[in-house]
Amino acid sequence: MTRAGNLCLSSAGAQVSLATSSDDRHPAEHIIDGNPETFWTTTGTFPQEFIISMNGLQKIGKIIIDSSLSKSCKAVSISMGYQTV
C-alpha cells in the first residue's frame, strides 16, 4: 500500500474509469493529469459523475475536489470501494 503523494494522478498509475460527459477540448483525463491549467468540463446536465481507479489498494487520508463555475453544485457524494480482478 502506497502512502505518499497524490494517488489520483495519472503519473501515480491512476486512470479515469468512467466519466458521464465528455468534451474533446477538456476530456476527463484532465481530472488526473496534475496540470492546474487543464480541466474536465461537463455537459451541464445533472448528475455528473466520474470514477478514478487507483493503482492497487490505497490508504486515503484526504480528498480535495476543486470545482469552479458550478452555479448549482449542492452536493458531492464520495464512494470508496474496491474490486478484485
Image (cartoon, rainbow, N blue to C red):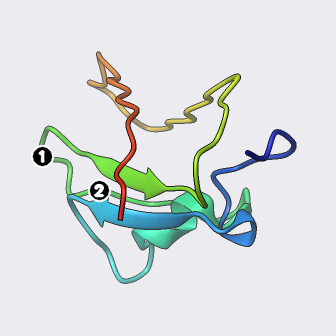
Three-letter residue code for mark 2: Thr
Q: Residues within 10 Å of mark 1 (few under 14, many from 20)?
A: few
- Extreme residue toward the front, this view: 85
Above or below for 5 versus 81: below
Q: Quadrant of residue 21?
A: bottom left
- Extreme residue toward the top, this view: 74
Left or right, residue 45 beside residue 7: left
Left or right, residue 5 beside residue 73: right
Where does residue 15 sit, x and y in percent of width and height?
Answer: 50, 67
- In this orientation, which residue lies closer to the viewer: 28 or 41? 28
Residue occupying image coordinates x 36% and y 83%: 24
- In this orientation, which residue lies closer to the viewer: 5 or 31? 5
Q: Mark 1 points at which residue?
A: 45
Q: Quadrant of the N terminus?
A: top right
Is the C-beta separation of discs 2 and 1 under 8 Å? yes
Q: Quadrant of the C terminus?
A: bottom left
Where does residue 81 sit, x and y in percent of width and height?
Answer: 38, 36
Above or below for 42 versus 24: above
Where does residue 9 sit, x and y in percent of width and height?
Answer: 68, 60
Q: Mark 2 points at which residue?
A: 42
Residue occupying image coordinates x 20% and y 58%: 20
Task: Give the secondary structure at mark 2.
Answer: loop
- In this orientation, which residue lies closer to the viewer: 34 or 62? 62
Left or right, residue 31 beside residue 49: right
Q: Distance between the residues labelled 2 and 1?
A: 8 Å
